[in-house]
Amino acid sequence: MKKQLHIFFTALMFYTRIPCPKNIDHNPEYLNKASRYFPLIGWIVGGISFVFYYIGAVFFTNEIAIILSIIAGILTTGAFHEDGFADVCDGFGGGWTKEKILLIMKDSAIGAYGAIGVVLLFLLKFQAIFSLLSKSEITNLQPVICNLLIFISAHSISRLSAISIVFTHQYSREDASSKSKPIAQNFTWKEVVGALFFGLLPLLTLSFFQSQLLLALIPVFIARFFLARYFQKWIDGYTGDCLGATQQVCEVIFYLSIIGIWKFI
């Protein structure tokens, strides 16, 4: 149990800005095993985002509350995944060879593709969450509980989609220039089972009250499949930025999928 707590806190330190015990560091061995808890981190980020939404909705408009929830999620992770999304937009938008794409993504400066991509991502995310939360009363759950499970499910499933690429593809960079390299070294069935458990449990709980919501997994993992194939085609694998971009894209697709299910099914 003590070792598992250490691994969990390693994941918490790596993927968020939440303070951890002083004895926790970026130990490569623990960081590699921490992939099993990546979707669990989504529970925490999604929960924090929901709390800020809920409090914001009490004092302000629904629109302001959603913006506050997005800001809370970004501050919790230190824009870890949004930065990866921006780098992927810049790298794949401006590079035409593997070497050039990787070089651009490694650059800390944000370019036109990255800036435009992030703006459009946030606009789509805001509108999707706004549309989604206005329809949550159609489930058999209390709207507050339903919204909480939606927030958590979006963050856990999108992180499961991202970390699953580690289980099926090779790390692209040949050197150790990325801090994400340790999670790409090796994994066991424990990492796979742990990621699946923590990634799917919130949606399974939500689907207990409305089973058709499980259909949201289909477009999410279709997007994950094509993103992974696209990365493989251009850079022979993935990088940490690719995982961050996958998380962001799959989170938005999850929101859109739930909207579509409630509208047409």
Image: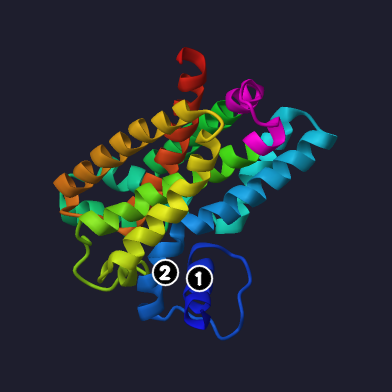
Neighbourhood count class around disc 1 (C-alpha, 10 Å): few under 14, some 14–19, many 20 upward? many
Considering depth in this image, is 218 or 108 the residue closer to the camera? 218
Disc 1 on helix, strand or loop? helix
Residue 63: name its quadrant: top right
Q: Main secondary structure of the magenta part?
A: helix
225 is higher (above) or lower (below) than 170: above
Q: Is residue 144 magenta?
A: yes
Residue found at the very far top of the displayed protein: 264
Marked residue nearer the N-terminal end (1 or 2): 1
Residue 55 forms part of the magenta stretch: no
Q: Residue at x 64, y 41 (%)?
A: 148
Q: Position of residue 57 (x, y in %)?
A: 77, 34
> Which x, y percent locates residue 247?
41, 47
Residue 160 visible to an observer of this rendering: yes
Q: Is residue 160 above or below residue 29?
A: above
Instruction: Please name the amino acid that badge 2 sits on.
Output: Ala
> Which stretch did the figure color magenta?
130-146
**Camera-nearest residue between 16 and 84:** 16
Q: Which mark is residue 34?
A: 2
Q: Which mark is residue 8?
A: 1
